[in-house]
Image (cartoon, rainbow, N blue to C red):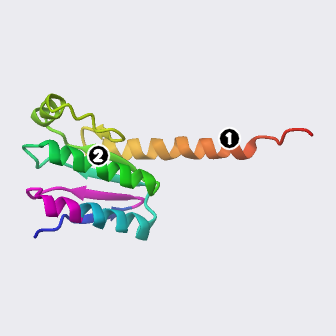
Amino acid sequence: MERVPVLKIGDILLVSIQVDMEDQTALQLQEDLAERIVETGCHGVIIDITALDIVDSFIGRMLSTIASISKVLDAETVVVGMRPAVAITLVELGLSLNGIRTALNVERGIELIAAARDEDDDLDLDSTDAEPASP
């Protein structure tokens, strides 16, 4: 069974899917990615699917599951490199990819994750700046 490499770039984990995603490979990727998020404390996951010509309902569900696992572990997920035919197929299959943001390329994906972290930081600051209510 092939494993999909998970690379750390700064505060982001990059997954570039270059192999055919069989069931066992996808399940192993979910496990490996969850472990790496916890190990590294990364707050972003970019999944590059540029090399995928076809995405079926299984792959779509796998991407949604990875996004959900990542979110629970405090990491934003962005899927990049989606080809038009893949996007059309996902829509035709009725897969909405809940919890997943998309971008055209890795650079834009990094920008989306940085913007999401900035928003979270602003929310944290707003909640700590609030003055306590008077008795």
Q: Amino acid at mark 2?
A: Ser
The residue that appears at 47% across and 54% down in the rendered structure is: 74
- The secondary structure type at the circle numbered 1 is helix
- For disc 1, the marked residue is 126
Where residue 95 appears, as percent x and y from the top left, is 22, 35
Vertically, is 69 above or below 25? Answer: above
Number of residues whose C-alpha sits closer than 10 Å to that of mark 2, classed few (under 14), some (14–19) or many (20 or more): some
Vertically, is 83 above or below 43? Answer: above
The residue that appears at 14% across and 28% down in the rendered structure is: 92
Residue 64 - label: 2
Q: Amino acid at mark 1?
A: Asp
Where does the magenta region start and end?
10-28
Q: In whole angstroms, how far apart are the C-alphas of marks 2 and 1?
A: 30 Å
Mark earlier in primary sequence (2, 1): 2
Residue 22 lies in the magenta stretch: yes
The residue that appears at 47% across and 42% down in the rendered structure is: 116
Q: Quadrant of residue 13?
A: bottom left
Q: Quadrant of residue 120?
A: top right
The residue that appears at 53% across and 44% down in the rendered structure is: 118
From this viewpoint, which residue is outermost toward the right? 135
- The secondary structure type at the circle numbered 2 is helix
Q: In the drawing, does residue 45 fall left or right of residue 25?
A: right
Q: Image quadrant for the N terminus?
A: bottom left
Residue 106 visible from this viewpoint: no
Tally of marks: 2
Where residue 62 appears, as percent x and y from the top left, is 23, 50
